[in-house]
Amino acid sequence: MAERTRHTPADEGFRKELMSVLPHLRAFARGLSGRSDFADDLVQEAAIKAWTARERYQAGTNMRAWTFAILRNHYLSELRRSKRQTDMDDGAVERMLVMEADQEGPLHLGDMETALQKLAPERREAVLLVGASGFSYEEAAQIAGCPIGTMKSRVARARADLARLLDSDQQQPPIDVKSRKAV
C-alpha cells in the first residue's frame, strides 16, 4: 500500500493559491487550443506539474504567471509531439450552424473563438495573455520568453487581425450546413 504524504501548512497555502488560478488557466488553455477537452487536459497536466514543483515556487510571487508558463510550455510540447492537426473540430462545425435570433450572444462568442483560432499561434497566445488574461506586457513577455517589444507587436498585430477577421465574417451571409447555400 502506498504511503500517504503529509502536507505542510505551506502546502495548503500553495494548494489554495493554485486552485484560485485554475479558472484562468482553463480560459487560457481554451484560447490556445480551441478545444475544451484538450484545454482541460492541459490544465490538469499544468496543475500536476505545478504541484510536483511546488518547492521551487517562491511564495509571494505571481502564481498566475508561473502556472501560465507551465501550461504554455506543456502546450508547446504537446504540439511538437503531435504532428497531425485537424482544420476544424466538431465544436467549430456546430458553431457555424444557423441559429435563432435570440442566440446572437453565443454566436458572436463563437465568431471570436473561430477568429482566434485563425491567428498565428504566437499572436493568439499574446492577445490571450494580455487581452483576456490581464497580464501586463512585461509579464506576458516573460511567460512567452520573448522581448517586451515583440510581445507588444504580437498583441497589436493580433488585435488588427481579429478586427479584420471579424469584420469579414460579418459581411458574409451565413451558410445553411445542409444545403450549403447562403441563408
Image (cartoon, rainbow, N blue to C red):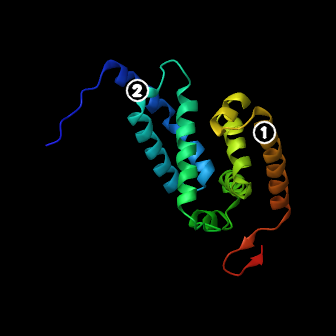
Q: Secondary structure at mark 1?
A: helix
* Side of 45 where 113 appears, left or right: right
Residue that appears at 66% across and 79% down: 178
Report the disc number at residue 55: 2
Mark 2 residue type: Glu
**Within 10 angstroms of label 1, few (less than 14), some, or many (20 or more) residues?**
some
Q: Do the numbered discs 1 and 2 sit on residues whose CB atoms are within 8 Å?
A: no
Report the disc number at residue 150: 1
- Residue 73 rendering spot, x and y as whole percentages: 56, 44
Residue that appears at 48% across and 44% down: 43
Judge whether 156 appears above or below 117 on screen: above
Residue that appears at 48% across and 21% down: 58
Quick one: which residue is furthest to the bottom in this view? 179
Label 1 vs label 2: CA separation?
32 Å
Report the disc number at residue 133: none
Image quarter in which the C terminus is found: bottom right
Q: Secondary structure at mark 2?
A: helix
- Residue 79 rendering spot, x and y as whole percentages: 57, 57
Quadrant housing residue 48: top left
**Label 1 vs 2, first from the N-terminus:** 2
* Side of 62 where 8 appears, left or right: left
Q: Is residue 24 visible?
A: no
* Side of 11 where 1 appears, left or right: left
Is 183 or 127 nearer to us in this picture?
127
